[in-house]
Image (tube, helix red, strand yellow):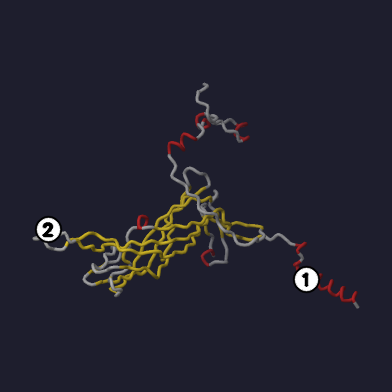
Amino acid sequence: MGAFELNSSTLHRNEIYADGLNPKRLREECIIALKVYDSCRQQDCLTPAQIGPARSAEHVCMGDEHIHEGDIIDPPDNAAAVTIDFLRIKKIIIVDKKPNPFKNGYWDIDIKYVFEYRLTFREADGTVIGCIRANSIFNKRITLFGSIGSDLAISTDLFRSFNDSQTIDSEPFIMVEAKSVALTADLHHKRGHHNFPEDKHCHDHQRVPNEVLVTIGLFSIVKLFRVVNLTVESRGFCVPEECEDISPLNPCEFFDSLDFPLDIFAPPQKPEFVAGISGNIPKGKKDCGC
């Protein structure tokens, strides 16, 4: 009886294995994938020095003030405090994408983040004066590896836009994921005087708010990817490394580090050309040696 149970169990396992779940019979599968060539994550604390004063996202009347869309917000004179809430990333704009002039295969990506939020002004006793929708803009440049390709013709009936042949440029595609956090909002004051011009001895000053300065936290992940065929085995989620802080290169330092392009002046002959041998002058060789 025990042998019969064992045989049944063995047969049952064989049936499962026959369905392709036997780990010893794993097969490689070819898929069409959006292959990530490079990615990075960033955690930016955006201060007023980076995003400037808050600007109005709407036309609104606040007291006697008429604030137009796009104007720097001039708070009410009696405002003693301001708060920020309902922050969201309204739009992420990929402004530009071009090859990095110094690093082959790398791409410079210019990204614009548009934040929208609500500002609420209060008097000293906490009474609400009014609310206004505002926005701020942050521009960022990131450099990532995207490799080098060429234009590719593609046609598929999976998407309507691809019913006819389309051309995919040689450039990699970009994906930006971001999350924002409202940190602080503060009134920026200018110093005003009471209107007593006849009293020269009056030194009473009144602080009048003229701008709203906000600080926003930004988490973002930027990826460069291409459409490729892959054979893959999943090992879970991938977490990008932090974005490398690439400071602007000094053009002269970069130029001086290059090998002298002797091939331009004396093109290689066939044996050297086929062998891929460069005729550049080795680094450190200063004399002409003509």
Q: Which residue is mark 2?
A: 201
Residue 10 is left or right of residue 111, and the answer is: right
What residue type is disc 2 on? Answer: His
Cα separation, mark 2 vs mark 1, equals 97 Å
Image height of 233 relative to 282, above or below:
below
Residue 45 is left or right of residue 226, and the answer is: left
**Residue 209 at x, y percent in the picture:** 26, 63
**Residue 262 at x, y percent in the picture:** 52, 30
**Residue 211 at x, y percent in the picture:** 28, 62
The residue at the point 30 percent across, 73 percent down is 126
Image height of 290 relative to 84, above or below:
above
Mark 2 or mark 1, which is nearer to you?
2
Label 2 environment density (alpha carbons within 10 Å; few <14, some 14–19, many ≥20): few
Question: Viewer-proximal residue, 53 or 227?
Answer: 53
Could you tell me which secondary element the residue under label 2 belongs to? loop
The residue at the point 43 percent across, 61 percent down is 217
What residue type is disc 1 on? Answer: Ile
Q: Which residue is mark 1?
A: 16
Label 1 environment density (alpha carbons within 10 Å; few <14, some 14–19, many ≥20): few
* Quadrant of the image occupied by residue 156: bottom right
